[in-house]
Amino acid sequence: MEFHLFTNYVEIAAVILFSVGFTTLLFHQNLMKKIIGFNIMDTAIFLFLAAKGYIAGRMAPILVEGANDPALYINPVPSALVLTGIVVSVSVTAFALALVLRLYERYGTLHLDEILYLTRGEHD
């Protein structure tokens, strides 16, 4: 099995996007930046799944007159997973933004360490 850098450029882009999102999620204390990093990671996963599901020279899984061989079509499962994942990602992002809005209204900051410090002060 050979590895060609330029034939796998979409997968490489997905890995780079994922690492950018992960480092954003890991190293930033601002909750909005964490949500953005999480969305970048989601996008990278969707790009990777779509790239793996595509096969050059094959058609979309819509039956065409005279094309009865299953080898002529791509597998529709990766596309369905990506579509479902996008819907779930949008829902999770909306919920996370609503939670962040409530945190900002209560504590007046989006910095995670400050919120944790203020919550500890409430319990004392």
Image (cartoon, rainbow, N blue to C red):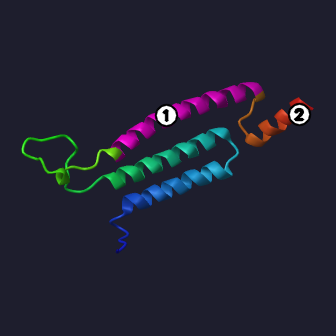
Distance CA(mark 2)–CA(mark 1): 34 Å
Residue at image position (44%, 40%) is 85
Residue 82 included in the magenta stretch of the image: yes
Residue 95 spot, x, y in % from top left = 58, 30
Residue at image position (19%, 54%) is 71
The front one of 49 and 28 is 49
Residue range highlighted in magenta: 78-106
Residue tagged by mark 1?
A: 90
Q: Residue furthest right?
A: 124
Mark 2 crowd level (few <14, some 14–19, many ≥20, 10 Å Cα): few
Q: Is 52 located above or below residue 4 in the figure?
A: above
Residue 87 included in the magenta stretch of the image: yes
The C terminus lies in which quarter of the figure?
top right
User: Would you say 117 lies left or right of 85 here?
Assistant: right
Dominant secondary structure, magenta:
helix
Looking at the image, do the residues carrying marks 2 and 1 touch, with CB atoms under 8 Å apart? no
Q: Find residue 34 and report its image quarter.
A: top right
Residue at image position (75%, 25%) is 106
Residue 1 spot, x, y in % from top left = 35, 74
Q: Is 94 located above or below residue 76 in the figure?
A: above
Q: Residue furthest front?
A: 69
SS class, disc 2: helix
Q: Label 1 sits on what residue type?
A: Val
User: Would you say 87 lies left or right of 70 here?
Assistant: right
Q: Label 2 sits on what residue type?
A: Gly
User: Would you say 64 lies left or right of 88 here?
Assistant: left
Residue tagged by mark 2?
A: 121
Residue 81 spot, x, y in % from top left = 39, 42
Q: Earlier in the sequence, mark 2 or mark 1?
A: 1
SS class, disc 1: helix
